[in-house]
Amino acid sequence: MRKSFARLLMIFVAGYMAFATVASAASYPDKPISMIISFTAGGSSDVQARIMQKYWNKLDTQPWVFVYKTGAGGAIGSGEIAHAKPNGYTIGGINVPHMVLQPLTQGAQFKIDDFSYICQVVNDPQVVAVRKDSPFKSVAEVFDYAKANPNKLKLGLVGPMSGHHLMYLETKAKYGLQACEVMYKGAADQNAALLGGEVDVIFGNVNDVMRSLEMLKILGVAAEKPSAFLPGVPTLREQGFDIVSDIRRGFVAPKGLDPATLAFLRQAFKKIALDPEYQAEMRKAGQPAEYLSGEEFEAYVRKQFEIDKALLVQFGLLKK
Amino acid sequence: MLGYVITALGHIIEPLNILLMLGGLIGGIVIGALPGLTATMGVALMVPVTFAMDPISGLIMLGAIYAGAIYGGSNSACLIRTPGTPSSVATTFDGFPMCQAGKADEALQTALLASAFGGVVGTFFLLFMSEPLATFALKFGGPEVFWLCIFGLSSIAVMSRDNMLKGLLSGGLGLLISTIGIDPNSGVPRFIFGYYPLAQGIEIIPAMIGLFSFSQVMVLLGSNRQFIAEYSPSKGAFGRVLRKLVADCKINLLRSSTIGTIIGMLPGAGGEIASIIAYNEAKRWDKESARFGTGIIEGVAASESANNAVIGGSLIPMLTLGIPGSAVAAVILGALLAHGIQPGFKIFAETGDLAYTFIISQLAVNILMVPVGYLMAKVMAKILNIRLTLVAVAIVTLSFIGSYAISNSMLDVWVVVGFGVIAFFGGLVGLDTGAMALGIILGPMVEENLGKCVNLAKAEGSIWQVFLASPISILLILLTLLSILAPILLGLRKKCRKTPSCMETLS
């Protein structure tokens, strides 16, 4: 009698636990989700996430709690996400090529394999910008000048080890550009240097040059299609230079996420990203939105990893 | 412009805006006074709140928090020798000695009036001279900022009264500590000893909390005192301070505020540097410079007026060029952009209503600061009447919470403890914590800009050409040399005065 009762109890307990796991998976999320931002509050990454938050809150589900983990160019925050418990309650923003370069060059505590990719939200292409009164009228003129006067053209980049730096390396590899590159800590310093005359040309981002657009001349954008924020500016490809270089922002969770949870997140983010009101707000804030699904984003990151690694090795910035 | 100013005045007196200004001021002062919570954090936390508001009201609130927080830092600087925000480092040099001498209320009122004055001066520059000043700010490139930082470092020689060598060593140690982290010129980690979280470097705020506050708690506990300082509120402190400032400190205040505005305009250089340079300039040009550091009004006035003037200065390039002059200005810029407002010279024309209302609100905030700060200072000063052990516990708790709150990193808490211990034992052998803090603050800026100079030299052909290229650089080099040589020359002259034969040869 006791034996069968004990067995019954065990079956009941096992059944209950199975039910509870299934039930909790089905009821995700049932508590607030931590959103890790790897850059300072008020910056572009934060502003973009806040806009998304507004539309996430409309989905009538658990709220996001913003956690700022800054430092090492975003590597500290990315490391946090990678090491968090993969239960769907910690997600965060991520930037490419930062997430590719930091493990390669800085010994950062994460690898690109450590994430479950939710989606991409921003594609901010690099641009070639000069002052309004600059004698350069096209990208070709800039490159020709550099070729004729090696190391005399002063080029401002944010870096080292950044999207701009990679664009410069790519240009050097493909077109032999030999300029005097000057590294700046951030876009604000870089733009100020261009406007003040310390450098002659910069490889900047659409999002950054938008702030002083009236004092700059954008010669070209390193994208596949022209940018809606820069009407009339041709792409580098249209000018005969096959350079596509950009900074991407997306959202990720730690690797090993339950497939149902990941699907939920991907669905929710997709819904927000395709909402026309969200897109209008992104345009108003000067953020170049571009949605890519989780799988596409992951494929892009892996491709970039190979390309960037090869570039760094080519220029001796990375031991093989 | 007058039309916009009048409309702006109309906006200012709207009840909601007045409420936001007062609330922002009070909140800002509290945030600034708490060690570890900074102006940047306070403003950043309130940015999402502004999304629900009209952009004008939102900006007014953010501006009020900014001004309140920069003033608020002086409260803890004077009372517990902890700069509540990095901009108040120099206020501890004279503010805390004043407090220890029983003149806490005078210290607080000086900080208040000086801050309000500095804020008003900075706003005047913003209102009337933003365009020419912004263009001038752009002329500060890598070499110029490099020499400005070297000039700031040279002020260590002026700062350490007793032993210049110990001051220089402390500053050098600070510079060495600032190299921990990622090399700004090659992107490679340095001195992290395999512990990756150190890649973010030693954050300046936890370091300062440790150097000044934590170590001070240890000193006070070891001193067997009942209270931090003797304090009995003296009547008429406000009036006394006001009279003294008007009578003796006019030039000091004007000079410090101008220094604050100019340094505020430079992206990257902020309140800490401005207040220290202003303090040292006040000391240099004072007839009895030995008094500085013993607890005099002039010292507090110089530091506090400079750091509030930085506010107006940092907003100049932010509004006109979209290039923020300080971290808080960067956050406010983010808020502007999120509201869809484009900075640029045309901000005064197309969105002139917003721009001028914001500027006029800064003037209003700085004037409102006086009564609000006066009342709050009276409350804050009561801390001195609480038993030391309780205050010490509170300071340590706040230090830990505040430093953790910066980047949610336990490393910062360990930095506080570590630097507290270093400063405590170092203080026994003559370590100059002010010089060390200066080294930690200026180290990264010096290195970054030196890197830019070296990079530029590839194009110019020679690094000397880069270093000596512009008149600004040369002026700063001369000021630095003057700063280093002046104490030596004055010392020689003093020695000479004692010997009659030397005097005859001189005259």
Image (cartoon, grey):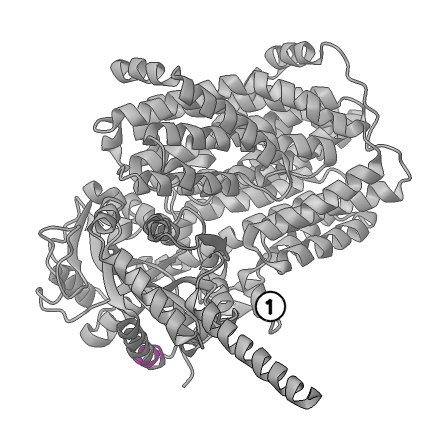
Q: Percent x, y for residue B203?
A: 58, 53
Is B450 within the magenta? no
Chain of the residue where label 1 is placed in the rendered structure: B
Which quarter of the figure has residue B130? top left
- Nearer to me, B266 or B394: B394
Question: Residue at the location (64% across, 23% down)?
Answer: B376
State whether residue B275 is above or below residue A213.
Answer: above
Disc 1 crowd rating (10 Å Cα; few below 14, some 14-19, many 20+) is some
Element on which disc 1 rests: loop
Q: Is residue A109 visible?
A: no
Question: Residue at the location (26% across, 73% down)?
Answer: A296
Is A310 within the magenta? yes
Q: Which residues are magenta?
A: A306-312
Q: Percent x, y for residue B143?
A: 42, 49
Q: Percent x, y for residue B332?
A: 40, 38
State whether residue B112 is above or below residue A301.
Answer: above
For the stretch drawn in magenta, the main secondary structure is helix
Q: Is residue A92 visible?
A: yes
Q: Which residue is mark 1?
A: B191
* Quadrant occupied by the C terminus of chain B: top right
- Nearer to me, B296 or A40: A40
- Nearer to me, A315 or B393: B393
Going by the numbered disc 1, the residue's amino acid type is Phe
Question: Residue at the location (23% across, 44% down)?
Answer: A284
Question: Residue at the location (62% across, 39% down)?
Answer: B485
